[in-house]
Amino acid sequence: MNDSFIFLADGFEEIEALTAVDVLRRAGMRVKTVSITSSLQVTGAHGVTVTADVIYDNTLFTNPEWLILPGGMPGAQNLHDFAPLQGLLKRQAQSPEGRIAAICAAPAVVLGELGLLEGHEATCYPGFESKMRGAKVVDRPVVTDSKFVLGNGPSNALDWALTIVAVTKGNSDAENVASAMLHYTLANQDIMNYFG
């Protein structure tokens, strides 16, 4: 299994980025967080600063398993504006085995604006649909199509990350990770209203 990479830009959505790192590592996947800035320290949209594993300019991206983009603003826009990442995403989209995951604003602001979702079923954070150039936009929490796993926002970060695991390692591995986290299917269960 090759390395997967989660890209962090100032203003990233913390829940989405850190959920993906946590879940993929629980599943035994090799994943590194990558700062696209000149510093390992990257500050999210809600003021949470994390230390990335590597800096983009010092990293070789040889046949990556996944390129993973959290959303958040201005994080997604900062990812889009980073030209080296644009080139890497285009190469990954053309690679026979390369896979890309994005959530929240990132499917639209990054992948949609680059034209990488053209002809694919896709989802994104509501209000960004106009940037999904040529995509078949659907209102679903998580969408898989071809080499893409896309999520619509922070509340679905866990299901999005588990879907990345399922696509990579199979449903059984994803279910094992989910069960260990006490995340069960709601089928045949009463849904509790936690908000009274």
Image (cartoon, rainbow, N blue to C red):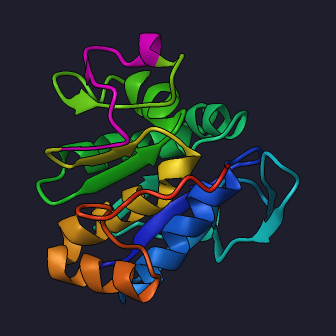
Farthest residue, direction right: 47
Residue 59 shows up from this direction: no
**Relative depth, front residue between 2 and 125:** 125
- On screen, residue 67 versus residue 134, left or right, reads right
Across and down, in percent, residue 102 comes to 43, 46
Across and down, in percent, residue 148 comes to 26, 46
Farthest residue, direction top: 130
| Placement of 26 over or under 7, stated as above or below | below
Q: Residue at x 35, y 44 (%)?
A: 150
Q: Quadrant of residue 136?
A: top left
| Placement of 7 over or under 105, stated as above or below | below
Q: Is residue 133 magenta?
A: yes
Across and down, in percent, residue 149 comes to 30, 49
Q: Residue at x 38, y 41 (%)?
A: 141
Across and down, in percent, residue 48 comes to 84, 60
Q: Is residue 152 magenta?
A: no
Q: Which residues are magenta?
A: 129-144
